[in-house]
Image: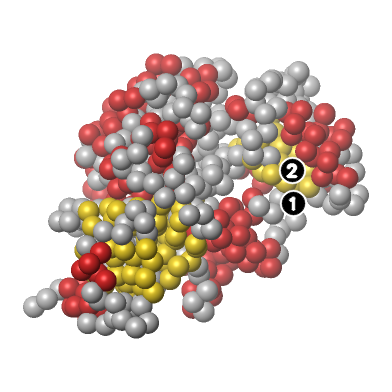
């Protein structure tokens, strides 16, 4: 008896294709046939893969034929760890990405004040003090105090979220409205940076960010954020997106859009937090033709490296006495891992620091030992960023997926040694090949909007360990960079497997989803410097051209 996928492929092959791509370089990611020239699509599925002559022979009177003229086709690229709504929202607030100094941040706020009525909130995102080219005149634990910001915005509350989302900067007016005083205590898992007199400087870390509460977005705002995020992802070749932490309202919106066939790309939505998982009910993996799957939970055990909230085994080199934060009590993470494995949820935990990663591995191992009958749980360590050498082999031994962000490596490494010391960076920071050699499956993403969601930039970082400017020459820790094929697997075949979607996608073979990314350059063969010049020509979702570039 034929398997279902084979029967589906035979049925599709019997009908004339809706669309054909010919004269291309097709990297199928299928070991049986890694290269081809053409792809046919019928009814949202791939119906044929082969030479241009073979596939053109299937053409019917209504078939659209796209001549690729040598362009490259790969499986639809998948963002394995991002914040979907956040991508759209980042385009709706004051953009601070790329600011080169605190003075520039203050200047952008000053310009925004001119266009806002008194009393209106100014919310921004994207500043990163580690990337400033000039340092503020005064710093407290690595951050400037709020004085200059407050001086240009005396009548408008201002709240500026750091690029990684793990810290926020408030001005005096915002802190006044939120009643922040010397007596205000940071909640568990958070920190309020204070000056020598005990006054808040304006910087709030991790859970302490909740002390500053700008107006909540409206339903219309969130729907617009979905539209903007979809537009940006499709423009950058992404057909499938793992949304790393969606609250109940967002999940309800996704379900509504999916029911109306209004999702523009496929979403794998992770429920945000243990309590929400318990209230959700049974997992909803979605059917073979579904654009939405809800079968996992996102937990957060520690903070971020840049804001010194990542939980470390030894203190920060540039902040002695500080070992970071437990954003969630490790006991709650152990509870979440056990609940997830017992109720059929994949458990995915944010872990940046070496202590945080160890605690996640401990929690997963305890759950696996409690339920040895569960053989295919695919638990994920989200970020796997700073690891103690002794914990690296545990990934492969336990079968824990390492969900990395290639672009974080080249974004963070120029300043990571200041936080950790050079020895700790070399031992376990962004050690992708060490993880692979342990037997771990690596999947890739950007943590957008922390970084640009562009998979080409993250792919380049993954295979070169260099910044976009090509620095350092040869790449940092070159022995840890991925090969071209390994990096592409981390964005396609392995990424789909990590979200239980391997039966439907991640490879270009008949019967799979007709989700494809078409690039102007062959990123498996062009020189390193040419990778970043690769343009997305077409993004195809469910057999439909969802994005078409104007460039030839």
Q: Residue at x 44, y 45 (%)?
A: 534
Q: Residue at x 60, y 27 (%)?
A: 130
Residue 242 appearing in the image? no
Q: Residue at x 75, y 56 (%)?
A: 215
> SS for tag 1?
loop
* Label of residue 214 in the image: 1
- The percent position of residue 94, horizontal first and vertical second, equals 72, 46
Quickly name the residue at label 2.
Answer: 159
Q: Earlier in the sequence, mark 1 or mark 2?
A: 2
- Residue 353, by quadrant, is top left
Horizontal side of residue 338 vs 52, given as left or right: right
Against 325, is 82 above or below? below
54 or 541, nearer to the observer: 54
Residue contact at pointers 1 and 2, CB within 8 angstroms: yes
Q: Residue at x 26, y 49 (%)?
A: 368
Against 57, is 52 above or below? above
Extreme residue toward the left, this view = 1
Against 23, is 454 above or below? above
Residue 56 appearing in the image? yes
368 or 40, nearer to the observer: 40
324 or 120, nearer to the observer: 120
């Amino acid at each position: 008896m034929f398997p279902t996928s084979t029967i589906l492929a035979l049925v599709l092959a019997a009908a004339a294709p809706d669309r054909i791509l010919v004269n291309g370089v097709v990297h199928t990611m299928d070991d049986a046939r890694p290269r081809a020239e053409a792809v046919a699509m019928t009814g949202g599925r791939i119906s044929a893969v082969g030479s241009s002559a073979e596939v053109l022979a299937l053409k019917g009177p209504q078939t659209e034929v796209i001549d690729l003229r040598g362009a490259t086709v790969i499986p639809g690229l998948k963002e394995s760890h991002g914040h979907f709504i956040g991508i759209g929202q980042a385009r709706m607030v004051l953009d601070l990405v790329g600011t080169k100094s605190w003075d520039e941040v203050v200047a952008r706020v000053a310009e925004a004040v001119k266009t806002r009525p008194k009393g209106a909130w100014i919310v921004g995102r994207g500043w990163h003090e580690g990337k400033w080219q000039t340092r503020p005149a005064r710093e407290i634990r690595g951050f400037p105090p709020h004085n200059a910001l407050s001086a240009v915005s005396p009548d408008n509350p201002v709240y500026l979220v750091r690029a990684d989302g793990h810290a926020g900067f408030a001005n005096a007016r915002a802190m006044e409205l939120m009643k922040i005083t010397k007596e205000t205590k940071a909640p568990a898992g958070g920190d309020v940076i204070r000056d020598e007199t005990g006054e808040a400087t304006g910087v709030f870390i991790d859970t302490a960010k909740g002390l500053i509460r700008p107006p909540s977005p409206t339903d219309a705002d969130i729907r617009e954020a979905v539209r903007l995020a979809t537009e940006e992802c499709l423009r950058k070749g992404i057909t499938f997106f793992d949304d790393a932490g969606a609250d109940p309202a967002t999940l309800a919106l996704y379900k509504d859009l999916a029911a109306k066939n209004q999702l523009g790309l496929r979403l794998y939505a992770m429920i945000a937090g243990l309590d929400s998982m318990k209230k959700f009910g049974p997992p909803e993996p979605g059917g073979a033709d579904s654009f939405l799957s809800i079968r996992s939970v996102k937990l957060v055990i520690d903070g971020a490296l840049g804001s010194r909230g990542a939980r470390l085994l030894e203190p920060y080199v540039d902040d002695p006495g500080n070992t970071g934060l437990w954003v969630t009590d490790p006991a709650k993470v152990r509870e979440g891992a056990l609940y997830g494995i017992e109720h059929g949820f994949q458990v995915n935990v944010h872990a940046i620091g070496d202590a945080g990663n160890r605690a996640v591995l401990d929690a997963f191992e305890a759950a696996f030992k409690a339920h040895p009958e569960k053989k295919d749980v695919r638990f994920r360590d989200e970020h796997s960023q700073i690891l103690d050498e002794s914990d690296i082999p545990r990934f492969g031994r336990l079968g824990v997926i390492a969900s990395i962000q290639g672009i974080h490596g080249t974004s963070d490494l120029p300043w990571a040694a200041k936080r950790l010391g050079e020895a700790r960076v070399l031992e376990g920071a962004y050690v992708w090949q060490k993880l692979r050699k342990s037997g771990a499956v690596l999947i890739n993403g950007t943590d957008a909007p922390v970084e640009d969601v562009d998979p080409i930039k993250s792919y380049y970082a993954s295979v070169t360990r260099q910044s976009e400017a090509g620095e350092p020459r040869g790449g940092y820790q070159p022995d840890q960079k991925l090969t071209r094929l390994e990096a592409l697997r981390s964005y396609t075949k392995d990424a789909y497997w990590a979200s239980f979607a391997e039966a439907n996608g991640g490879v270009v073979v008949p019967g799979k989803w007709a989700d494809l990314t078409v690039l102007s350059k062959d990123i498996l063969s062009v020189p390193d410097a040419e990778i970043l010049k690769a343009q997305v020509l077409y993004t195809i979702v469910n057999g439909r051209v969802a994005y078409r570039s104007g460039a030839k």
